[in-house]
Image (spheres, rainbow, N blue to C red):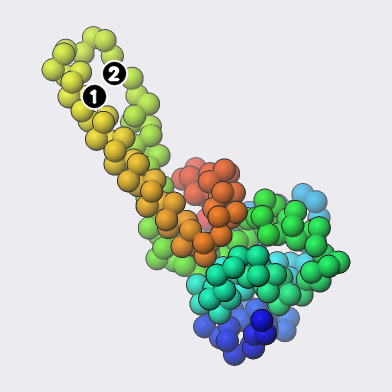
Amino acid sequence: MQYTEKEFNRCLVNPMRKQLLHKDTKLESIWKGAEDEDNFFIDDVPREKICRYIVCMYDPESPLLKESVFAQRKADAAVIAGYDLDADAKFLEEHVYSCSNEYVLTVLVNYQRLSNNRLMASINADEQTYWEFVKRLMEPITKSEKDKDMMSALDIKTKLSEAKEVINKRLTENWKKLFAGDEDAVKEVVKRNVFRPEHQAGIV
């Protein structure tokens, strides 16, 4: 499907704008904490391509979000970003589409912090509460406690466990919203604990 530059005007930045990295200072923070171990993004050309791809694929105002077929949405985003679907097929499959590349995932999360601030705030709050509940649930109930105290502690743990699952479900739904329904991105975020409080402390 063909898209025009005007259709992207509501995005945080317009991915069809020329020299995107040099003209928009809003993007300066998206590289924070991104480690390019394989030197795939060592200069501005590949960095600009991955930035354009992320905007097209995940910005909440991107017109590509109307495309419900993910394979097509990813292909369209790649073309707009400047990738060649044939020549770059291997690179796209291994490092871009799956979000399994640490650099790509970090830049994506940082971009979503800019473009989805309210949703990010909700996710951050739920993540903090979730891990606090996990910590509480892992604290042992000592045998020295009286029966009444033990029953009370068990009851509290049961309620904490139920509340934790509610939060976990809400987090999963919000992750999907944040990453425009892309389950590959959600899987990588969960696997790497990207939103765990101690992880965020190093990149926020």
Identify which amino acid the numbered label 1 is placed on. Answer: Leu
Identify the residue shown where x is 17% and y is 24%.
Answer: 152
Extreme-front residue of the structure? 69
- Label 1 crowd bin: few (<14), some (14–19), many (20+), radius 10 Å: some
Extreme-left residue of the structure? 148
Residue 90: image location, x then y, percent: 81, 58
Indicate the quadrant containing the N terminus: top left, top right, bottom left or bottom right. Answer: bottom right
Residue 141: image location, x then y, percent: 29, 18
Identify the residue shown where x is 43% and y is 58%.
Answer: 174
Identify the residue shown where x is 16% and y is 13%.
Answer: 147
- Label 2 crowd bin: few (<14), some (14–19), many (20+), radius 10 Å: some
Residue for badge 1: 154
Q: Is residue 199 visible?
A: no
| Residue 176 or residue 68, whichever sits in front | 68
Identify which amino acid the numbered label 2 is placed on. Answer: Ile
| Residue 67 or residue 204, whichever sits in front | 67
Residue for badge 2: 141
Q: Is residue 182 visible?
A: yes
Identify the residue shown where x is 53% and y is 76%.
Answer: 66
| Above or below, 187 relative to 144 | below
Q: Earlier in the sequence, mark 2 or mark 1?
A: 2
Tag 2 near tag 1, CB within 8 Å: yes
Extreme-top residue of the structure? 144
Q: Secondary structure at mark 2?
A: loop
Q: Quarter-wise, where is residue 27 in the image?
A: bottom right
Q: CA distance from mark 2 to mark 1?
A: 8 Å
Q: Secondary structure at mark 1?
A: helix
